[in-house]
Structures are given as structure tokens and as C-alpha cells.
Image: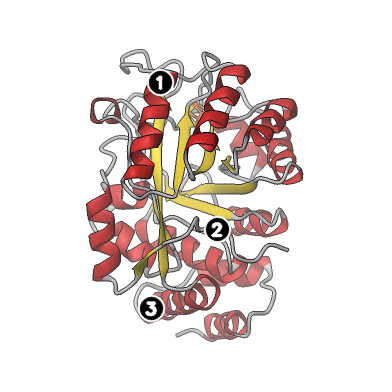
Amino acid sequence: MKQDFLNALERAQQEKNMSIDEMMILLSAQEGEETGALFSLANKIRHKYVGEEVHLRGLLEISNYCTRNCLYCGLRLDNQPLVRYRMTEEEIIDTAYRAEHHGFKTIVLQSGEDPYYSTDMLEKMIAKIKKETDLVVTLSLGEKDREDYKRFREAGANRYLLKHEIMNPLIFKKLKPDSLWRERIQCIAWLRELGYEVGSGCMVGLPGQSLSDLAQDILFMKRMNVDMVGIGPFIPHAQTPLKDEKMGDLTLTLKAVAVSRIVLKDINMPATTAIETIHPEGRKRALEAGANVLMPNISPVENRKHYEIYPNKAALDLEEAKKLINALGRKVGQGHGNRMKRN
Ligand code: SF4
């Protein structure tokens, strides 16, 4: 192992604050001994701060309509061939009942940016789910006004996922031409102020992204004191302008998961579907490199193939998730799986 890697690993072991340069050294770990040592340290830190439980979040993709045109995303407005669907309020609430019945403690309502669901409708749905179940409600509905976030929170929503995607403002502008970087960051700050548990995250292997960008992404999430971190590889989708770009690398994605655990410590972090999509053991390997959450898909089966942010999305149902957790000698999370310690 190289000396500069050993020095950075030693500081990580001592739980010192990591500089951008040290994070970059860890992200550059050579495959083999170095990555082995990095993943093993991340796994130990995961064990120390969040224990052996793997929390299950039921992911319900309520609509694949989107008004935006992110260059990397299959749900983009200009992807005309995509079959679009939307769930009704009744279908969403029924699925929430079923999720609770099957033992989920959290439901994640996710969609593209779809104005069909008004603030009133969403507020009503959230309040009903909260009143009639014991589920934690996580929203992942994109950028909204502060007042909307406030109303959802007051209706009972507990968590909100809004990935910052990439901190490099130039790449952000190129890849998200109809979003503004500072507005997205503002949304994340509002969510924190309003008392949500906030999830952010980034993609690994975006065109033009450097290791320094990736380290900045992790540092940003540390500075924002986010509660959840979602990291997945960039996967080119054939019906997007990035169709010919190179796919994100598995090992670098796992290194980003590990460094996020080392830097952010007590966060909840899923082994993402995107990692499994690029490697048949991706989820398992992410759970061994710092991840502690799985998100089985609870969307109606006929909708799943149309929620195609990227192609050939790996499926995960509840039973497979439990099998994986048991195979790793870990435990299925019994409680709501909130972030344990929040500063
Ligand atoms: S990344 Fe989100 S906002 Fe952008 S096109 Fe896809 S669903 Fe819409």
C-alpha cells in the first residue's frame, strides 16, 4: 500500500476530519489491498455508529412524469417514447396500507417533478397515511417552494430526499439545463430548517467529473449535516443525450460509499439499485462498504418498467432483501430507522 494512502487511512481510523486531499487519496485507493482496507474501515465505522441493522424502506414510484430535462435521466420530458403513468391518491394510500401490513416502517413516495399532484393533494395524502398508519413518510418529489415543503412537513412528512447530484456548478448547469444549482442547494437548506431528516446524494462517473468533484460532493453533504446519503453510478440511458457516455465504475462508486461513511459516520445510506444494476453483487458489496439501508420496490409491478431513470434497473423485493441481510449476518431493522444522533 502506498504511504500517502496509509497516512490518510490512519487519519480516517482515528476519526479525524478529512481534508479534500485526504478524501481524494482514499477515493484513489488501488483495487486489491487498498480498497480492501478502505471498505473494511468503512464497515467498522458503520458497525460502530449505526450497528448491524439494515433498514428497509418501501419505495413507491408514484409517477414517472417530469417537466424537466436532465441530460442523464430517462424520465426527462423530451423522452417521448417513454410510457408515462401516474398513480391515483387511492392507489397510493392503498399501497401504503399494504406496505405497513408487510412490515415496512418507512414508505418513500417518489416521482419526477410532476405538477399534477397539487400541494393540497399531497398534503391530504400525507396526512391520511400518517393518521392511519405508523409509517415514516419520506418524500422524493424534487424541487418545490419553501411553503410547499412546510405544508408537507406540517401534514406529517418526516423525511425528504433531494440529491444535489453534483457540486461542480459547471457540470450541474450542463447536465441540468433547466435547474439552478443555487436553488437546489437552497431547497436542501430549507428542508433542514423545516426539521425534515434530509437525504442528499450524488452520481459517480458523470461526464467531466473529477475525483476532486466527488470529494467536494462528500464534503458538501458533511457541511449540510445531511441524515441520508444516496450514491449510485451514472448509467447511460439510450433515450438521453448522454447515451454514448461511459458508465460509472463499480469500484469508484463503492469507494465513494466507503468515504461517505468514514466522513459522515452516523448517516443512513442505502445500497442503491443503481449499484446492483451495474453489478450482480452491487448491493451486497455496498452493504459491506458502509451502507445500511435497502429500498425494496413496492410500486405496482406494471409501473416498474416505466420508471426508467436508467435502463435495466435491478429489481429488489422484500424477501430478497431479507435474504441478503441474513446472508450477511446482519439484522433486519425493527424500528423506524431514524438517524440515531443528530447534531
Ligand atoms: S433527474 Fe429528476 S428532475 Fe431531472 S429529468 Fe429525471 S426525474 Fe426529472
* Amino acid at dot 1: Glu
Going by the image, does 313 lie left or right of 182? Answer: left
Who is closer to the viewer here, 9 or 3? 9
Q: Earlier in the sequence, mark 2 or mark 1?
A: 1
Would you name the residue on which mark 1 appears? 90
Would you name the residue on which mark 2 appears? 211
Would you name the residue on which mark 3 appears? 36
User: Where does the image place residue 253, in percent across and percent down from the top left?
Assistant: 43, 57
Who is closer to the viewer here, 306 or 330? 330
Disc 3 packing (10 Å; few <14; some 14–19; many ≥20): few
Query: Is label 1 within 8 A of ligand 1 (CB to nearest ligand atom)?
Result: no
**How far separated are the C-alphas under marks 1 and 3?**
48 Å
Q: Is residue 149 visible?
A: yes
**How far separated are the C-alphas under marks 2 and 1?**
45 Å
Circle nearer the viewer, 2 or 3: 3
* Amino acid at dot 3: Gly
Q: Quadrant of the C terminus?
A: bottom right
The answer to whether 335 is drawn above or below residue 126 in the figure is: below
**How far separated are the C-alphas under marks 2 and 3?**
19 Å
Circle nearer the viewer, 1 or 3: 1
User: Where does the image place residue 202, in percent across and percent down from the top left?
Assistant: 53, 47
User: Where does the image place residue 322, in percent across and percent down from the top left?
Assistant: 27, 59
Who is closer to the viewer here, 193 or 275? 193
Disc 2 packing (10 Å; few <14; some 14–19; many ≥20): some
The answer to whether 240 is drawn above or below residue 225 in the figure is: above
Q: Earlier in the sequence, mark 2 or mark 3?
A: 3
Mark 3 falls on what kind of element? helix
